[in-house]
Amino acid sequence: MELTATTTIRKPTSEVYAFWRDLENLPTFMAHLEEVRTTGDRTSRWVADAPFGKDIAWNAEIVDETPGEKIAWRSTGDADVPNAGTVRFVRAPDGVSTEVHISLVYDIPGGTIGKAVAKYFGEEPHQQLDDDLRRLKQVIETGEVVRSDGAPWGKRAREEFPQRPAQPLSDAELAKGADR
Amino acid sequence: MRANTWAGRNKVEVRDVPDPRILNRRDAIVKITSTAICGSDLHLVDGYVPTMQDGDVMGHEFMGEVIEVGPDVPPERLRVGDRVVVPFPIACGACGACAAELYSCCENTNPNAGIAEKMFGHPVAGIFGYSHLTGGFAGGQAQYARVPFADVGPLKIESDLADEQVLFLSDILPTGYMGAEMCDIQPSDVVAVWGAGPVGQFAMDSARVLGAAKVIAIDKEPYRLQMAERAGHIPVNFEEVDVRSRLLELTGGRGPDKCIDAVGLEATHGSAHVAAYDRVKQAVRSETERPHALRQAIMSCRSGGVVSVIGVYGGLMDKFPAGAWMNRSLTLRTGQCHVQRYMKPLLKRIEGGELDPTRIITHRLPLEEAEHGFEIFKNKEDHCEKVVLKP
Ligand SMILES: NC(=O)c1ccc[n+]([C@@H]2O[C@H](COP(=O)([O-])OP(=O)(O)OC[C@H]3O[C@@H](n4cnc5c(N)ncnc54)[C@H](O)[C@@H]3O)[C@@H](O)[C@H]2O)c1
Ligand SMILES: [Zn+2]
Ligand SMILES: [Zn+2]
């Protein structure tokens, strides 16, 4: 399965590139990631968020990079869901913003993991990636993922629909957090 | 705290809800001192804006005192104790739309942008108390509200102006003003305004302030037309006269140079069978608008004129007079108001006495009586023009 998405961020390419190149930032906006840990100059360890498939983790390496322009990576070893990605950073015509073009390829296996991944992406798989990029834009332009009363848990806005009412959260809800 | 909530179609209810907390680092919590009911709230209550949920806190016109700020709100921008008016669109101040001062189209403040994008092609900003399509933010008809991006939107009031003089900077005064500003008013212009509700009244006053030669008010409620007349505008009652003929008469046959739609999707029509056509289509949801005012504005406007739309539309419209629009070189301009753009300049005009926002207030009620407020505002009872609620 190949997914593509794009957004424009009102920051210079160098800044957007640097944010992405620190792969540990990816889980702040990519809904399917729990954690990414850098293990070497080009290598990293990725842990998926539960709905993507419980206890899935894999190693990845950067296979191509041009500072300020492009990063390409792929999973290594026997990943449960072999995957690869490329992100390109292009100066927008306004001269101040950066266009982010991302492409992800998943090799979806059979079995329970394949089912979990397919369920995660749902009927309109590109929407997840669109939402990821929306959050990337929020984080880089405003500092954080934006929360509302109806969609308080940032990365989970879409799956919460229909949402809790647009009224403040109770102490119990706040204490419970995004746990499902 | 107590808050006025949406309780299904045609029903609002003041209930106990939790107090708001800081959720993002640039939030503030405001203790509300004054809040208002808007024509936009009627669209929600009447069920014409999708994605409302039982228990949603209503209200997007409010002001009050800052009682808490998040860690990333710079103290030079906002502090505990500040008195602020809060603009209804939530804007981040950093995206492309905000950089272009198109605050109601902010690209970052709507957590449900994906859903809005499906309906509108591109997403719109978050709005307080205005459905989940615009973010699912609790509104301001309450004792307290959480205000995201508190370092961007809220306007500090440092003078001793009363709440009632500045409250409407949150929405309807900037909205009316933007409606007039989009008309590029020239000194020779006759400006016709459909709707003598609060938004229409301020569009009329703004057209005058921007130098229009004549301002015409079109509505069917005699008391609202009288209010416009007292402010110096020319009333036209669409239930008593044929609007087009009357407008031709008032403009030497040219038609108004500029037309403002301050009615929106729940317009009524003088002729029963035309009204029935759209009412039925709207009821079965094969059309979401009842666009009588907009159609009439387009047909009436002089060739080459501007039709400025500040009345709210939500979806799809039937029988849009595209021929009149295209063949007569009309310009159509519109938008949810970019309130942040207008707050400071309009505060100056209030301080200078050029605009008196208090002239439209007819009712002051405790928050507990919000339901009654909605009823009289919606049904035009007791000469209701604008209700201010006191939490
Ligand atoms: N663009 C924005 O940012 C913005 C902001 C606030 C409000 N609004 C919208 O502005 C509109 C007006 O708001 P309001 O608070 O004044 O509401 P309101 O309901 O009090 O006023 C609407 C008025 O229009 C009159 N009307 C109905 N049908 C008409 C017709 N065919 N011709 C002429 N007049 C007609 C009604 O009698 C009423 O007096 C609403 O649609 C509201 O949602 C837009
Ligand atoms: Zn309003
Ligand atoms: Zn913005």
Image: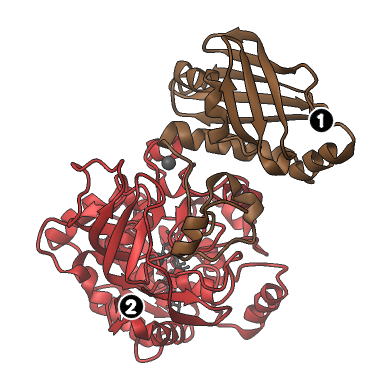
Chain colours: A brown, B red
Of helix, strand and loop, which one carries label 2? loop
Residue A82 coordinates in the image, percent (x, y): 79, 24
Distance (Cα) linking label 2 and label 1:
55 Å
* x then y, percent, for residue B69: 28, 50
Q: Are marks 2 and 1 in contact (CB under 8 Å)?
A: no
Q: Are marks 2 and 1 on the same chain?
A: no
* The image quadrant in which ligand 2 is located: bottom left
Residue at the farthest left position: B160
Residue farthest along the front direction in this orientation = A55
Can residue A52 be seen at all in this image of the molecule? yes
Query: Tag 2: residue type?
Result: Lys
Q: Residue furthest right?
A: A110
Mark whose residue sits in front, 2 or 1:
1
Residue under pointer 2: B386
Identify which residue, B127 or A168, lies in the foreground: A168
To which residue does mark 1 refer?
A: A1
Disc 1 is attached to a residue of which chain? A
